[in-house]
Image: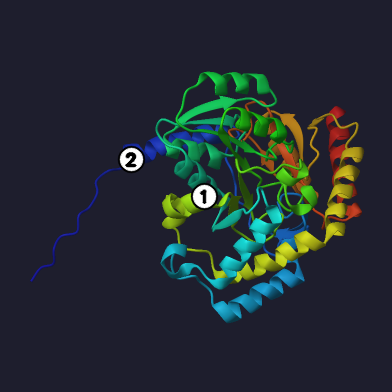
Amino acid sequence: MTGAAHPTSVRTQPAPPIEDLRCALERRRSDGLVRVRRTVESAQGPRVRVDGRACVSFASNDYLGLAGDAAVAAALREGLARWGAGAGASHLVCGHFAPHEALERDLAAFVAPCDGARALLFSTGYLANLAILSALAGRGDAIFADRRNHASLNDGMLLSRARFVRYAQPDATVLRTRLATIRARRKLIATDAVFSMDGDLAMLPQLLELAEAFDALLVVDDAHGFGVLGEGRGSVAHFALASERIVYMGTLGKAAGVAGAFVAAHPVIIETLLQTARPYIYTTAAPPALACALRAALDRVREDAPRRARLFENMQRFRAGARGLPWTLAPSPTAIQPLIIGPNAATLALSDALFERGLWVPAIRPPSVPQGSARLRISLSSAHSADDIDQLLAALHEIAQRGSR
C-alpha cells in the first residue's frame, strides 16, 4: 500500500505577504527604527550582566530598587509555598484569592483618589487602560486625550469606539474649547500623569477643574508616578487632589518592583469595570504569590521615605552634572531624564558608545517620540550609587568632547 503523496512547493521566491513584510522590515532598518532585545543574565538591579557584559543599567523602571529587595523576594517565596504558582482562572471564575483581595484593599486605602475608593487588580497596565476606556466609554461618547499619552491609552480609546479628541499640554484653553463645543453622552479626559518619554507632569489640577466644569471623568495613568511622587501615593496625591471623577491607574512593575497594575476609583466605577470590562473578565488572574510580594513592596513604598529621598538626590546629582553637554536635557522633575539627541542614527551611536563603556542607556526613537526627537531615556533609581551617576556623566562628557574635535 502506498502512502499518500506529500504536497511539495515549487515556489522559489517568498510568498507575496512574506516579501511585503520583509520589505517593511528593511525600511525600518534603513530608517534606524529596528529594535533589538538584549538578554539580561543576572537579577534586576542597578548593576546587571547583559549580553555577556557587566553594565550599570539606566534602562529599568525599577525606581525604588524593589525588584531586588530581600523582603519582597521573601514574601514571594512564602506566597509560592502557600498559594502555588498560578491562579487557575480569571478573577470572576475561581482565580480571585485572599491575597488579591487584601492587596486591593491596601491599594485603595493608600492611593485614595476619593472617599470610599475601591481598587481592582489587573495583570498589566496595558490591560488596565484598555479596560477603563472600553468599559466607561462607547459610541456616542468622547474621550479627550493628551497627544503624548501612552500607547495603551490610545489603544483603549480605539477599542471603545468613542470619539477621539486630542489636545496638546499645557494648552488648557484649547481643551476647554473642545470640551465646550463637542457634544457627547459621556466625556472622559485621559492623560498620563508622568509622561514616559519626557518625564514631565500633566497639569492634573487644571484637568480636574475642567472635568468638573464639563461633567467629565478624569482618567489618570500614573505608571511612572505611583511609588515615587506624593510620598509614594502618586501624582494625584502630589497635587493634593481627590474627587469621585478621578479614575486612577497605577502599575506595579515599576516603582513597586514586581508586576501588574490596579485601578482605584469610586466604588460604582470599579463595579462597572468588574462587571463589564472585557480585559478584566476574560484574563486569567495573576498568581496570588505576586500579590503577596506586592503587599511587601507596598509596605516599603509606604514606610521607606529615605529610599525615595535617595532617588531625588540622584536626580539632582545627574541634572547638575549634565550641565554643559551639547544635547538637550528635558526639564524633567522625575526619575525619567531624557537627553534629546535628534537623529535616529546619532542616538543609536551614542547609546552603543555608552554600552561599550559598560553603561546601558536605551535609545528611544519614533514612533515612541516625535520625528527628529530621538533621545536617550535615562532612568534613575534609588539603588544607583553616586559613583554610578558620576560614571555615566563622565562618559557622556568624554563622548561629547571627542565628537567636538
Quadrant (top left/top right/bottom left/bottom right) for the N terminus: bottom left
The number of numbered discs placed on residues in the rendered structure image is 2
Q: Nearer the viewer, residue 396 or 114?
A: 114
Q: Is residue 202 visible?
A: no
Residue with the most extreme front position: 115
Q: Nearer the viewer, residue 322 or 297?
A: 297
Helix, strand or loop at label 1? It is helix
- Is residue 311 visible in the rendered image? The answer is yes
Residue 326, given in percent of the width and then of the height, sits at 84, 29
Graded by Cα atoms within 10 Å as few (under 14), some (14 to 19) or many (20 or more), the crowding at tag 2 reads few
158 relative position to 287: left or right: left
Q: Where is mark 2, residue-wise?
A: 13
- The residue lying at 49 percent from left, 47 percent from top is 131
Amino acid, disc 1:
Val
**CB contact under 8 Å: marks 2 and 1:** no
Res 404 quadrant in image: top right
Q: If the image is split into quadrants, where does the C terminus sit?
A: top right
> Where, by quadrant of the figure, is residue 310 drawn?
bottom right
Disc 1 residue crowd, few under 14, some 14–19, many 20+, Cα 10 Å = few
Q: Residue at x 91, y 40 (%)?
A: 321
Question: Residue at 55% of width from left, 36% of height from top?
Answer: 29
Q: Which residue is mark 1?
A: 268
Horizontal side of 402 relative to 35 (left or right) equals: right
Q: Is residue 156 left or right of residue 342?
A: left
